[in-house]
Image (tube, helix red, strand yellow):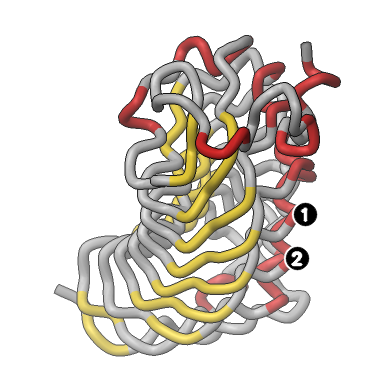
Amino acid sequence: FLNGSIPKGLFGLPKLTQVELQDNLLTGGFPETYDHVAVNLGQISLSNNQLSGSLPASIGNFSGVQKLLLDGNKFSGSIPPEIGKLQQLSKIDFSSNKFSGKIPPEISKCRLLTFVDLSRNQLSGDIPTEITGMRILNYLNLSKNHLSGSIPGSIASMQSLTSVDFSYNNFSGLVPGTGQFSYFNYTSFVGNPDLCGPYLGPCKNGVGGDSHPAHLRGLSASL
């Protein structure tokens, strides 16, 4: 097992194409990169270490990275909005950390994403409606956070999205049964006692019902 911290100049090595340091005992933070990033760097895998601290804004310098895997660490703080600069990203896994704050809507600028796992963190706030612009996304896991609000009905129009997990959060309101929602099942929503819908039971006090169209956020536009 490797231990110690990640060398500050590692990501600047000119011929570097991949960083695979997963399953070690690395400590310290994610190094600042400034402007000197290997132009051909396509994958960063730091999964299952003991890395901590917040992600620097300079993570936005990794413009060519396609896979960013930081799961199973102790990273904390907000996910920086600069993540939206990683326009080549196809897979992002930040699960099992201590990230807090809101999901940055800028993540929707990563239009090549097919896999997003932000589960098992301390994220809060709403799901940004901008994610419905991620047209080739097929896996989205936001489970076991502190997210709240309604689940955007416009997700119904995300035709590539075949696997979602919104379980064990604080979501409320109606889960539609139309569009892509018809492919999901109860396990995708369990642990949100204020959700209701086709496979979740009737809505309480009219929440999500026809007399409360405000709870159908984005739904009518997607049908």
Q: Residue at x 37, y 64 (%)?
A: 46
Q: In terms of depth relative to the viewer, which is nearer, 85 or 134?
A: 134
Q: Residue at x 40, y 83 (%)?
A: 52
Foreground mark, 1 or 2, reads: 1
Hey, what amino acid is under mark 2? Glu
In this rendering, the answer to whether 140 lies above or below 106 is above
Q: Which residue is mark 1?
A: 106
Instruction: Please state the total of marks drawn on the protein image.
Output: 2
In this rendering, the answer to whether 78 lies above or below 166 is below
- The answer, for residue 42, to whether it is visible in the render is yes
Give the percent coordinates (x, y) of residue 115: 51, 36
Q: Which residue is mark 2?
A: 82
Dots 1, 2 in contact, CB < 8 A: yes
Quarter of the image for residue 214 reads top right
Q: Which of pointers 1 and 2 lies earlier in the amino acid sequence?
A: 2
Q: Residue at x 57, y 48 (%)?
A: 42
